[in-house]
Image (spheres, rainbow, N blue to C red):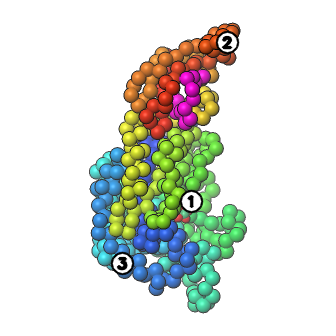
Amino acid sequence: MAGEGLAGHLEWMREARFGLFIHWGLYSAAARHEWVKSRERTRDEDYDLYFEHFEPDLYNPVEWAREAKRAGMRYFVVTTKHHEGFCLWDSKYTSYKATNTPAKADLLAPMVEAFRAEGLRVGFYHSLIDWHHPDFPIDGYHPQRDDDDFKAKNTGRDIAKYREYLHAQVRELLTGYGKVDYLFFDFSYPAERRPEIWGNKGRDDWGSKDLLAMVRELQPGIAVNDRLDLPDEGDVATPEQYQPFETMAVRGGRGLWEACQTLNGSWGYDRDNLDWKPPEMLVKMLVDGVSKDGNLLLNVGPTGRGEFDGRAVATLREIGGWMKRHNPSIYGCGPAPYKPPPDCRYTMKGDRLYLHVFSWPFRHLHLPGLAGRVKFARFLHDGSEVRREEVDPAQEPFNTRLGGLPAGTLTLELPVNKPDALVPVIELLFS
Ligand code: GLC
C-alpha cells in the first residue's frame, strides 16, 4: 500500500496532510505580488520605500495560529526570507531585516511560538535567490536584468560570498528557533531545466550538498523539500499551482509530495487580484491530493499591517467548518485500492474507506468491487446511515426497479438533495 515505505521522519507530515503557507515580507506592502520587485524592475533605492514604511501594527501571530488551527491545518511554513532578500528575523548577517523597520522586532520568533502553542509543526521557507544581496550575481530574474549601467557596475559580484551568507543564515535559523520540522528552499534554475533564463543557478552556486548536510546535522529528523537541485534529493516533492494527475513516486516511496497552492494565484498579498478560489474548490483540492497520497500546503499572504485579510479568513473558516466534521477522511489517510465512481475520490485509513462526492448524483452511487465488504455506511457530516443494496446482476429493469449491475457492485441510496457540506463524504466501514 502507498505510504508503507515512507521514511520515519516524514510520518508526522503524512499524518498531518494539511498545512498553512505564509508569504509575508516587504512585498506585502506593495500589495501586487511577491515578485513585484522583479516584475517592475524596481531599484533598491525605490524598493526601500517598503522597508522604511513596513509597519505591521496589527500583527498578532496568536490570531494567525488560531485561524490555521481552526482551518484544520497541522503545520505551517513561513517565508523567513523571500527573493527580495528581506529577513523577518533578527539576523546578525544583514541590516536588511524586520528589526530595522518601524516594526522594530524579530517577527519570526513570536510566530514560531504562537503556532507551536497551538500544536502546529514549524516550517521555514527560505529563498535561495536574493535580489538585495550585493554579491548575488545578476541573472534573468533579477530586477536589474535589463539595466546595463547597473550590470556594468556589478560585474564583480562573488557568488562564493553570497553562498557563505546563505549558509550562515540557514545555520542561524536552524539554531535560534528550537525544533524546525520542515525546511522549504526556493528555488534552483539550472541551465538544463531553465534554458530560457540567463545566469542560471543551481547546486554549485548554493553549495547545495554541504547546505543539506548542515541542515540535517543541525536538525536531525527535519523534512527538506526538493528545490536544491540535487539528484535524488529531498524528502518532499513540491508541485506548485497544479494538482498531480496521479500518485507521485517520491524517492521510491520513501518521500512525500505536497502541492503548494494559493488562494488567488499570488503568494504575497495582492490587493486587486480577483482570482479567489472558492472554498469548495480548495476542499476538493485537499481531498484530491490525499486520494493520491499527497499533502496540501495552502497559502495566505498577510497584509502589510500584519493581518490575514477578510477574504482569506472567510475562506479558511469555511474550510475549517468542513474539516471539523470531515477530518477523519483527511488526517493520516491515503489512497484506496478501489476505483471510485465518476466525480468522486476515495481516501482510506485502516478499515475505513471514505467516499468524497464532488458532484451530487440522483439517488444512487454504484461502487464497483465493494459488494459484501461493507458492514456500515454513514455520512461524516452528521453520522446518519446511508442505506446499501446489492442489485442482482440478472435483475431485469422494470419501471422503478433498477436493472442488474455488474457482479460485485455495492449500491448506495442517496437523499435527493446534496447534504449541507462543501464536499459530502460517506464513510464505509469494512467488515
Ligand atoms: C515560486 C515562486 C515564489 C513562491 C514559491 C512557492 O517558486 O518564486 O514566489 O514563493 O514558488 O512555492
Q: Amino acid at mark 2?
A: Pro
Q: Quadrant of residue 59?
A: bottom left
Residue 407, horizontal then vertical, whole percent: 66, 14
Question: Mark 3 highlights which residue?
Answer: 53
Quadrant of residue 80 within the rendered picture: bottom left
Give above or below for 267 relative to 200: above
**Residue 377 belongs to magenta span:** no
**Comparing marks 1 and 2, which lies closer to the viewer?**
2
Nearest to N terminus: mark 1 or mark 2: 1
Q: Could you tell me the amino acid type at mark 3? A: His
Label 1 residue near ligand 1, CB within 8 Å:
yes
Judging from the image, what secondary structure is the residue with disc 3 in? Answer: loop
Residue at image coords 44%, 36%: 421
| Residue in the picture at 59% in, 48% down | 243
Magenta residues (range):
352-366
- Comparing marks 3 and 2, which lies closer to the viewer? 2
Question: Few, some or many C-alpha atoms within 10 Å of disc 3 (few <14, some 14-19, many ≥20)?
Answer: some
Q: Residue at x 31, y 76 (%)?
A: 102
Q: Name which of mark 3 and mark 2 comes first in the sequence.
A: 3
Marks 1/2: CA–CA distance: 57 Å
Mark 2, residue position: 397
Q: Name the amino acid, label 1.
A: Arg
Q: Position of residue 101 (x, y in %)?
A: 34, 77
Mark 1 touches mark 2? (CB < 8 Å) = no
Res 357 seen here: yes
Return the residue at label 1. 227
Per the image, label 1 sits on a secondary structure element best described as: loop
Q: Is residue 10 visible?
A: no
